[in-house]
């Protein structure tokens, strides 16, 4: 039995699906580190966790080390120290190195977490990405504008997804964004236009073992700028086609350049209007926003369990893609709390058999303020066009009204 420690700061549903998957592996003795108390774990999962250790700050490598040493006395010296959150990857890596645990090291973790460093590494490796500059002053920001022009994108140095990311179209907007983001360096990038996708991939010993491709419609940044737009994600059934050869080549090369030897990664990339690939961001972690669920439906396997086997045991059985899958995120317009959801009955009549999972906005639920919205519907079919049409129907028929 391999001792494995999972750091999960808070027992949120999305995190617990990954913890649960590790707990069900036959060859693992699982310890959990969290800020939440052990009694907050669901009863069934709590019975499969061999030991728990609570700390005040799961982003503090020193506290993680104390917890690991304490749990080691109860489950044995851990062979893996894992977690799924973007913000955890550097603290986990620092703790691994201090404790002598195999896995992603601190230097590689910083290359994934620090988006300016990431793009520098990719550029040096000859891999395609947007022009960028880490601007420490307003003068440096203005100088970047002079060389690149508007529009551009401004984001934190260590961002995650589209959080605190802004499109900037003018000098005044740039000044406003720099004021909002406050002190500290700001990563500025040229604004790349085209179709935005994700590339989710697994490697073992530096060798590709799995990848999945999805397409965003539209980009998360555009969704955040336009409150009336509903976000959709499509996983086409067929991805082993020439149009994806470039991202397969550059995507796996990027993971190697950034230092991922064994693990799972989530990459966002653009296909530009002239057909080129431009890598946007990469995280050394599984994807969020229900993407692991979408991959599960597309391949008709439990991708949470597949990730768990890779993270805990360096084992991954690559599944075959059997379906096209799509997710329509139900997003309310404006501010307030959900009053009602209109159009569900019509969707149930028209698309009922295609819907494989749904999380509907609840009455009284506050708006999330993100591109993921207040709920979602997942649809599946062997034909990609059927799924595309279903997504279009959902986002044009369903309306989330606020009180």
Image (cartoon, helix red, strand yellow):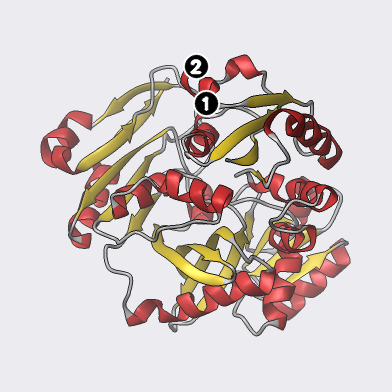
Camera-side residue of 238 and 222: 238
Mark earlier in primary sequence (1, 2): 2
Residue 148 pos. (x, y %): 69, 77
Camera-side residue of 306 and 195: 306
69 vs 100: above or below: above
196 vs 76: above or below: below
Camera-side residue of 279 and 283: 283
Given the current orientation, which residue lies at the most extreme left position? 349
Residue 337 pos. (x, y %): 47, 22
Helix, strand or loop for disc 2? helix
Quarter location, residue 329: top left
Quarter location, residue 128: bottom right
Instruction: Using residue 282 as the reference point, say whether residue 26 is left or right of it.
Output: left
- The Cα–Cα distance between marks 1 and 2, rounded to whole angstroms, is 9 Å
Instruction: Using residue 165 as the reference point, say whether residue 271 is left or right of it.
Output: left
Please indicate, yes or no, whether residue 193 appears anywhere in the rendered image. Answer: no
Question: Would you call the spot at circle 2 few (<14 residues within 10 Å), some (14-19), or many (20 or more)?
Answer: few
Please indicate, yes or no, whether residue 309 appears anywhere in the rendered image. Answer: yes
338 vs 95: above or below: above
Q: Which mark is residue 366?
A: none
Q: Which residue position is annotated with label 2?
A: 43
Q: Residue at x 76, y 36 (%)?
A: 68
Instruction: Using residue 298 as the reference point, say whether residue 123 is left or right of it.
Output: right
Q: Which residue position is annotated with label 1?
A: 48
Residue 143 pos. (x, y %): 81, 74
1 vs 2, front mark: 1
Helix, strand or loop for disc 1? helix
Q: Quadrant of the N terminus?
A: top right
Given the current orientation, which residue lies at the most extreme front position? 1
Residue 25 pos. (x, y %): 48, 40
């Amino acid at each position: 039995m391999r001792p494995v420690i999972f750091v999960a700061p808070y027992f949120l549903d999305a995190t617990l699906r990954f913890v649960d998957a590790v707990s069900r592996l036959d060859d693992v003795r699982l310890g959990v580190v969290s800020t939440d108390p052990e009694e907050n774990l669901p009863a069934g999962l709590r019975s499969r966790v061999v030991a728990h250790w609570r700390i005040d700050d799961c982003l503090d490598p020193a506290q993680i080390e104390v917890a690991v040493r304490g749990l080691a006395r109860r489950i044995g010296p851990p062979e893996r120290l894992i977690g799924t959150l973007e913000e955890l990857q550097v603290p986990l890596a620092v703790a691994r190195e201090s404790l002598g645990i195999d896995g992603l090291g601190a230097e590689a973790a910083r290359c994934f977490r620090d988006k300016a460093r990431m793009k520098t590494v990719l550029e040096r490796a000859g891999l395609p990405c947007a022009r960028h500059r880490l601007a420490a002053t307003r003068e440096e920001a203005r100088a970047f504008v002079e060389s690149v022009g508007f529009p551009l994108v401004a984001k934190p140095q260590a961002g995650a997804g589209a959080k605190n990311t802004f499109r900037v179209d003018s000098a005044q907007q740039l000044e406003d964004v720099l004021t909002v983001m406050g002190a500290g360096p700001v990563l500025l990038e040229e604004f790349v236009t085209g179709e935005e996708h994700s590339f989710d991939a697994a490697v073992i010993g530096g060798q590709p073992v799995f990848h999945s491709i999805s397409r965003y419609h539209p980009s998360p940044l555009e969704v955040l700028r336009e409150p009336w737009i509903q976000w959709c994600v499509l996983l086409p059934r067929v991805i082993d086609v020439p149009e994806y050869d470039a991202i397969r080549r550059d995507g796996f090369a990027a993971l190697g350049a950034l230092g991922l030897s064994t693990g799972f990664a989530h990459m966002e990339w653009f296909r530009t209007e002239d057909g080129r690939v431009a890598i946007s961001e990469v995280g050394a972690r599984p994807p969020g926003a229900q993407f692991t669920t979408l991959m599960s439906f597309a391949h008709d396997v439990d991708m949470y369990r597949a990730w768990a086997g890779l993270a805990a045991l360096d084992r991954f059985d690559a599944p075959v893609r059997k379906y096209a899958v799509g997710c329509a995120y139900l997003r309310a317009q404006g501010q307030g709390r959900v009053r009602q959801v209109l159009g569900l009955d019509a969707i149930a009549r028209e698309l009922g058999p295609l819907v494989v999972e749904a999380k509907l906005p609840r009455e009284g639920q506050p708006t999330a303020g993100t591109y993921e919205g207040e709920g979602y519907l997942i649809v599946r079919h062997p034909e990609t066009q059927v799924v595309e049409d279903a997504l279009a129907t959902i986002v044009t028929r369903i309306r989330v009204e606020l009180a």
